[in-house]
Image (cartoon, rainbow, N blue to C red):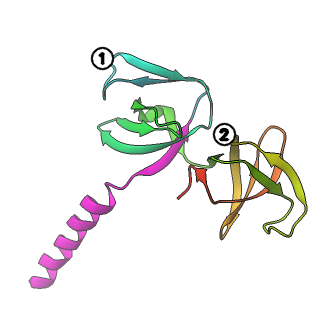
Amino acid sequence: MWRKVVFLFLISFCTNVLGNENYYLMLKNSKANVRMGPGLDYPIKFIYKKKNLPVKVIDKKENFRKIIDHKKNSGWIHISQLKKINSIIVLSNRILFKKPTFNSKPIANIESGRLFVLKKCKKDWCEVSSQNYSGWINMNDVWGKD
């Protein structure tokens, strides 16, 4: 009997504690309304116009998620406008490399704020691509991946 009680307690604990952690998603479309509150009746606060932009989910209520972006803008967005994360924004000037090592050939200087789509990751490095570049970047100081 006590095993069942402990088991139910652990399930409840994991659901409550782990389910409330912040996590990243990204914008599904090139236009997404961000609202003042968690419902379609709330006024639009601003509109995102950047497909694949990573955002951090900091709260949820029914079908809406409260999000914050890399510039600290926040608001509520319908879950249908979001999808699983596979993009990042670099938060400082970086170098894009041919291979996942600092000793590799540099491909390009990347300015802060550049959006990249993730292809695959190995330890502290991810292979990324954008409209103009493709290569490996060290994952320190990026928005969209913990």
Judged left or right of residue 24, residue 107 is: right
Using the image as rendered, state which of residue 83 and residue 21 is in the foreground: 21
Quickly name the residue at label 1. Answer: 41
Residue sitting at x 84%, y 39%: 132
The boundaries of the magenta stretch are: 2-27
Residue 10, quarter of picture: bottom left
Tell me how far mark 1 sits from mark 2, CA to CA: 32 Å
The dot on residue 113 is 2
Q: Is residue 45 left or right of residue 129?
A: left
Q: Which mark is residue 21?
A: none
Name the residue nearer the viewer: 18 or 94.
94
Please say if 142 is above or below 121: above
Q: Nearer the viewer, residue 86 or 109?
A: 109
Upstream in sequence: badge 1 or badge 2 = 1
Identity, as a three-letter code, of the amino acid under mark 2: Gly
Which residue is at 80% across, 37% downward? Answer: 131
